[in-house]
Amino acid sequence: MRSLLFSRSFSPASPASLLQRPPAAAAAAAVASSSSMADGGAAPRARARLRGVVFDMDGTLTVPAIDFAAMYRAVLGDDKYRRIRAESPAGIDILHHIEGWSPERQRTAYEVIADYERQGLDRLQIMPGAAELCSFLDSKKLRGLITRNVKSAVDLFHQRFGVIFSPALSREFRPYKPDPAPLLHICSSWEVQPSEVMMVGDSLKDDVTCGKRAGAFTCLLDQTGRYDAPEFDSVDLKPDFKVSCLTELFPLLEANFDLAP
C-alpha cells in the first residue's frame, strides 16, 4: 500500500522540534512517530483530530479529462512552455502567467482555456472510489471542494454524480489555489481550525501548496508515480501523505486520525 508518509525515511521528532512547526505539520510528525514506535514499546501519541476533508476536483474527484500540457502549449506557445516547464518541474501556474498580460491577450488565452475545459466536461467521469469515499465521510466528516475550474464545471459535477460538496469554491473565488485563501475560507465557514482539516489533490503545486500554506494536513494523489521522479526530491513543500488511488484514503484516515464526529 502506498498510503504512506511522503518522506522516504523518518526519525521520531523531539517535542521541541514539533513545537516549532505549524500545527498540522507537528501533528503529522506525531502520527509518523506513533507509527514508528509501534514495535518499540513506547507509548503511542494520540491521533490528531480530523474534522473535515477538502478535495480538488479535476484529476482527483474526476478522472483526468483535460490535456493540460496541450492547453499550456496552446496558450503559451511551444518555446515559452518548454522554458517555464524546465524552470518549474512541480507544474505550470497558467492562470498566474495570464494575469500579467494585456486585456486582449488575456481574453484570447481564457477562450483557449475555456475550450479545453468544455472538451473535458464532455468526457467527465467520477474517479473510482470517490463516491464510496464521500459516503464514508458523510457519517463522519465535513467535506468541501476547491478547484481552479469554473463554477459551471462544479455544478455539472454535482448534478451528474449526485455528490455534493459544501462549500465548493471554483476559480471565481479569488485568490485561487495555490493561495491558502480558499481553504482558510472553508475552515472559517465550518468553524474549524486548518490543523483539523486535510487537503487532498493531485497537484503538488496547487493542492499541496495551498494546504501547507493554510496549516492543514495534505495528501497527494499520485496515480502514475509521477512525483517519485528525482526532480521532485528538492521541492520546498511536500505532502504529509501520498496515495495512488482514493480507496487508499479509507485506511489512511482510520489509522492515523481521530474521526469521531
Image: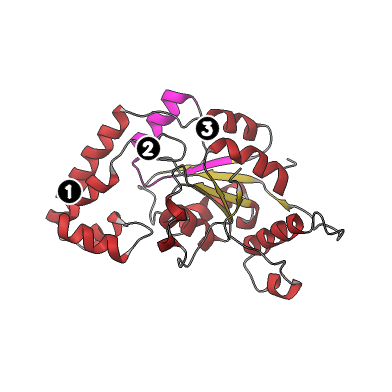
Q: Amino acid at mark 1?
A: Ala
Estimate the x, y position of residue 48 in percent, counting from the top left. Answer: 72, 53
Residue holding disc 1: 74
Say whether marks 3 and 2 touch (CB < 8 Å). Answer: no
Q: Earlier in the sequence, mark 3 or mark 1?
A: 1
Bounds of the magenta segment: 143-162
Q: Is residue 170 above or below residue 88?
A: above
Residue holding disc 2: 64
Mark number, residue 130: 3
Q: Quadrant of the C terminus?
A: top right
Secondary structure of residue under mark 2: loop
Residue 258 visible in image: no
Q: Is residue 167 above or below residue 156?
A: below
Q: Earlier in the sequence, mark 2 or mark 1?
A: 2
Question: On the picture, is 162 further left or further right than 79?
Answer: right
Secondary structure of residue under mark 1: helix
Q: Amino acid at mark 2?
A: Pro
